[in-house]
Every structure is written in structure tokens, then in C-alpha cells.
Amino acid sequence: MMPQLSISRRTRSTPFTSRVEAAGVQAYTVYNHTLLATKFRGFEEDYWHLCKHVQVWDVSCEKQVAISGPDAYRLIQLMTPRDLSKARIGRCFYVPLCNPQGGIVNDPIAIKLSENDWWLSIADTDVMLWAQGLATGFRLDVNVTEPDVWPLAVQGPKAETLMARVFGEDVRNIKFFNIKPMTYQGVSMQVARSGWSKQGGFEIYVNDESLAGPLWDELFAQGQDLNVGPGCPNLIERVESGLLSLGNDMGYDTTPLECGLEQYVDLESDIDSLSLPALRQHTPERQLKGLVINQAVEIIDLNVYVDGQVVGQITSQAYAPKYGVHLAFVLCSLAQLNVSLTLDVNTSQGTMSGQITSLPFNFNRLGLTPTTPA
Amino acid sequence: MMPQLSISRRTRSTPFTSRVEAAGVQAYTVYNHTLLATKFRGFEEDYWHLCKHVQVWDVSCEKQVAISGPDAYRLIQLMTPRDLSKARIGRCFYVPLCNPQGGIVNDPIAIKLSENDWWLSIADTDVMLWAQGLATGFRLDVNVTEPDVWPLAVQGPKAETLMARVFGEDVRNIKFFNIKPMTYQGVSMQVARSGWSKQGGFEIYVNDESLAGPLWDELFAQGQDLNVGPGCPNLIERVESGLLSLGNDMGYDTTPLECGLEQYVDLESDIDSLSLPALRQHTPERQLKGLVINQAVEIIDLNVYVDGQVVGQITSQAYAPKYGVHLAFVLCSLAQLNVSLTLDVNTSQGTMSGQITSLPFNFNRLGLTPTTPA
């Protein structure tokens, strides 16, 4: 039985919480000290709906760490090994933030709003404290704050149609990972083509608490014929899409090079980044990989085995109904990955074997054909 | 209806979680990215049991931020406005941590283990990131880590008896807010007389994962005749005892001077603390106070009113069955507090009035006599 969640002022509610509750939220998690829905009708029902229609997600828990001032770029560059020196205004960048040992502190979207104004749209650690500590210690000329911004995601194949009805046709011109101020009820707010699914969509950085309810309601009113529904980051969809989750698949004790994020680490660059010296010296001994088990299983411990020896751990997992397979991310000894094509897991029906594969999953190459529900 | 909590690897389980579940936990919160039980038999039943007997609490969520090295004191002193220059080894100190604006970052217990080894036993923000940021920026000669330590609290009037049975008679000699290494099954671990209740007790800083289960089981086996039970920080007890909660009653936007913590701010000291300059200039315009309503009520919004005007907010509240009154902490305009002795609240039965009082509550002075349950 799933336990209950005690909600207090500390587990912050959002300007959308009353709508989320009225929409029948079944379960929450707590993310950046804020409520985040995890389930409405059920993981599978939510999944199929997201893949076919359009959902509205309260992702206020994606707090913005706003970094403003002449040293804004310098601070952000210290925090990430990704070269942002040529970043253009109005663009979004997925950036691992790493400590001087190369460990992952967070994996936000960095948004360059103007030359000296950046937002980090963060995952579940208090990046503001780290940024403030660095800014104070290095005596940087920046302001680091958490502005009153509550992102609302509109996700799914019909997201663009719905967004165009509410924000106007111009929203269609926003390219992937671009951000642009749009107007709602006379208030300018940033809108990006982004979101924590691979079904397409937008994130609206709502900056006026009094517009939160009306905007939610209007998305539902305008989207009735599109079968709009309430949603949230969906476990099945994000595992199937190979989207990593901080705290689950990576964290302080892993580096981007272990987690398949090497494309976001500019080892050759001459940027001033705290983690680059360590990352240049770092030879990964583990690697995050995909695991595919050709049936539904209930895995009863998170270890993965070769010849009965523990060689790694499962970090996330879900049954993927579209392909009829159980998918997992595993953080596994690289030495083992070089000699073995399969890993064993303990399930409620005994030991089963799964196929190791790269991430993101390439279902076509795996010979798996998508199905749709009856 | 209380929603469910989705548990993942990110909402860290602890070495005690299997015991907590077997003991019938009803609800959790998430605290420092870790599961924290909030209720076993019910808030009131848990409360009465805690006041009369002894409880074992999994408070692994009180993560330790370990600061070691020649600059350990210097870093900690930068973080807090409380003068720790004369701190003795083996002592615990309640310390507000404040940012350069004077806002409260955390309110840990600082533990001085040796001259260059401190632990901060933290509330619910990522203090490690702030400490690492400061240490990096100021180029301090320290190591800042989160060691594998899982505090287990033994709380209640019979706690000392139970602890003496498990750890030996010497545990009785540990004075309040002192810490001492004690031995369990041959392993040395720190034990402090402390805990997040005012019913007395100890916190065991369990440092060996394999001993967690056996220690929990032994406390229950040895405490059977003491009516030992599972427990957790109890909302009723902590409000009645005037214990503040970070994120509920204080946070980045409040200073210690607004929250009744002036005794932990050494304004006159010449210590090198980041927040002292701002705190010396700070004239509080709000104050955290107690509110007592002489009956059980269901408060339907968190504002408090004088003459129909909002003058503050309720930050925590609970019905106190021992006194038959509803208690609240309110963060209230100081100007109002100087002219009004009561505040109004909106309840499901209409507007009701409560008496403003100092914190912690002095029930004797309020003319309230404790009762025991039938």
C-alpha cells in the first residue's frame, strides 16, 4: 500500500494546487520543497493520454534560480562544464552543474534572457544556495534569487494547437529550446518550447499568481475538443524516452561522463569551470545504460548481476506498455559492460535476464514495434 | 482526503525504512530528499504515547554536513551569527545559519566533535551546497561532505531508562546538548542528549548501516515493559513545545530577529560572520508569536486579522488535547502586536478570536491546566 503524504507549509503548494486537486490528483512527490503530482488516472492511463492528446502539468517545482548582474555568465560558467561562452539570448541549454570533484549538483535548463540575466530552471537540489555561496566567496557582482515564477507545462502532440488558441499563432514560431515573451491577459511571460517529455510541447513561465487559475481554466476550456487532461511528468514516458532524473539516475556521486552526458561537457574548452580540471582527469568505471526485459516483471531488488555477482544497480524502471517490455536504467561497472551483453535481475518469478542497450532506447534497432491500446 | 506519496530512489529510503513500514507508518513527508514518518497511530495517539512512554524515531533525514580541516571553524562561523569562538568539544549548539541579507538558510544543531571536525545536523535545505560554495569561493582548507550517518532518536520520559539498557549506564551521564561516543556491538557511534521534542531523550548517530536494523530491534525488545513504540516528530508536541520548523515558521525571507531567535545572534561579537552586518542594521517589522484559541477549531485560511485587515499569517498550528486549546504560530506585523492583544481567524464556524502570547507557550501563565486522557 502506498503511504500518504503529510502536506504542510514546508511542502509548498502552488498557485495551481487547487486545480490539481480538483482534477483528481492521486499521488504527489515533493520536489524542490514543492508538491509535484505523479499520477492522475494511473501511470498507464496518463501515459497513453499524454502520447495521444495534450496535458497541462503544474511543474511549479521547477524553481527558477535567477542570476543577474555583470558577473552572471561568469558564475554560471563556473558551475557547469558545458561551454556557454557563445550562448545566444532567447535560447535554452541543458547543463549539468558539477562540483569541483565532477559530481553532478543539478541538471537544469539554463535560459539566457538577456546578456546579464539568466535563469536556471532546476531539478531537485537547492542550487540557489550553491550559487549564493560561490557568488559570496568569489565576490561576484551578481544577484542570486528565486523569483516568483511557476512553470506550467503543456505537453503532448496537440500541445501546439492548444497553445496557439490561448497565446496566438505566433507561439508556433518558437523553435525547440527557444524562449520568447508571450502575452496572456496583458501580462508578458516567457514561453519556451520544452518540457520533461518527448511528446512535444511548451513550458509557460507564469509570473503572476493571479493569472495561474484563469490560465489553467482557459487551457482546459479551449482544449475540450482536443481531449485536454491534467498530467504530470510520467514515469513510463520518461523512462521510455531516456530522460534522466536527478536523485534517481545521477547525483553528487556520479559524473556526467558516467551518465551519458559527455556531449554537455566541453573537455577541450578553455572556459573557467570549477569541474573541468577534475573531469579531464576522470576515467569512468561505471556507465549508465539501458536494460530491456522482454516481459512485464516485478523486480524485487535493485541490484543487477552477472554470474551471480552484483555489477550495478537499477536507478529507474517502468513497464513500457507500448512495446510490451520492462525498461530500466542501470548504473553498471564498465568492465562488465565490455564483456557481457545481458544482466540478470531478481524478480518475483525468479532470476530473469535483460539485454543491455545504449540510451536513449532505440526501439527500432531493438526490433520492437510500437502498439496502441485496444 | 490525504493524497498518496510516490516513493522513488530520489525520495531516499533509510536503513530503518523496513522497520518503519513494519511498524505501521501511516504517512510520510519528504525532508532533505529523505522519507520522514509523520504519523503512526494518529497525531493525538502518537502525542499521548510520546508524553508518557518512549518512542524510537527514524530521523535519518537529519543529514549531517561534515566540515573538516583547519578552516572548519572559520567556515561555520561565516555561516552563523552565533558566536562559536569559545565552543567546547563534545557540545551541541542550536545555530541559525543566515545569508548575507540575514535570511535564515537553515537552523541546524552544530556539533563540535574535535578542534577541526564539526557536524551540522541540518533541517530541510541543502546546506552542503552552500558550505561547498563558500568553501570553494573563499578557498578554505576544508572538506565538506555528507557522511553515511543515520540519526535515530529515542524520545520520551522513559528514554533514559531504555538507552541505559542498550548502551550501558554511562549514557545517563550525557548532559543536555552534549555528545559522546558510545559503543553498540563493538562499533563506536556518537550519542547526544537532544531531539526534536521536549519530552527528553537522545539521538544516536548510527554510522554502520548493518547495525541499523539490529539496534532498532534491540530498542524494541529491551523496551517492551516500558511500552516502547514507533514514533516521529509529532506536530502537536512540537507546536505545544514552541519548536520552530524551517520552511514552515522561518526561511530565507525571515531573520532570526523576527522569529524569536535573538539569543542565537551575537550582535555585539567581533566574529567574522556573513550575516552580522545586515542583522545589526535590521529592524524587524514582523514577529513570530503564539496564538491561543480556547477551543478546537478548523481554520480555513492562514491569514490573521485585526478589524478585518490581514496583519499576518499562521505558520504552524495544532489542537493541543492536553490543554483543550488550538495553538498556532503567527508571523505578525509588529505594529499590530503593539496595539492588539488578540487576533481573528477564519474558521469553519465563522470568525473566532485568539489571544496573542509569547513563545514558547507558558501554559501556567495562560491559566491552562494540563489534563491526561481518560
Image (cartoon, coloured by chain):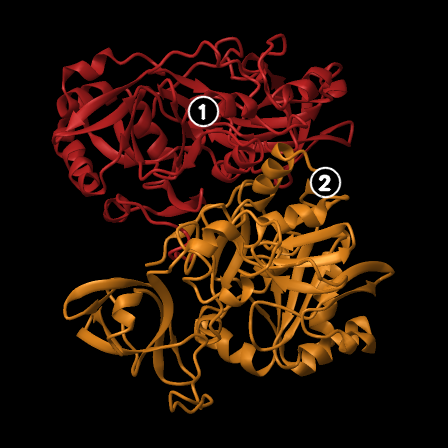
Chain colours: A red, B orange
Say which chain tag 2 marks: B
Left or right placement of residue B155 versus residue B169 in this view: left
Crowdedness of circle 2 by 10 Å Cα count: few (<14), some, many (20+)?
many
Q: Say which of A137 and A9 sits in front.
A: A137
Q: Amino acid at mark 1?
A: Ala
The numbered disc on residue A72 is 1
Using the image, determine if residue A122 lies above or below residue B257.
Answer: above
The numbered disc on residue B142 is 2
Q: How many numbered marks appear?
A: 2
In the picture, residue A160 is in which quadrant? top left
Left or right placement of residue A94 versus residue A288 in this view: left
Using the image, determine if residue B101 lies above or below residue B244.
Answer: above
Q: Amino acid at mark 2?
A: Val
Q: Say which of B226 and B349 sits in front.
A: B349
The numbered disc on residue B292 is none
Which secondary structure lies at badge 1? Answer: helix
Say which chain tag 1 marks: A
Which secondary structure lies at badge 2? Answer: loop
Q: Residue at x 58, y 78 (%)?
A: B199
Counting from the top left corner in percent of width and height, residue A281 is at: 73, 17
Q: Say which of A370 and B350 sits in front.
A: B350
Counting from the top left corner in percent of width and height, residue A173 is at: 23, 11
Counting from the top left corner in percent of width and height, residue B205 is at: 71, 59
Q: Quadrant of the C terminus of chain B?
A: bottom left
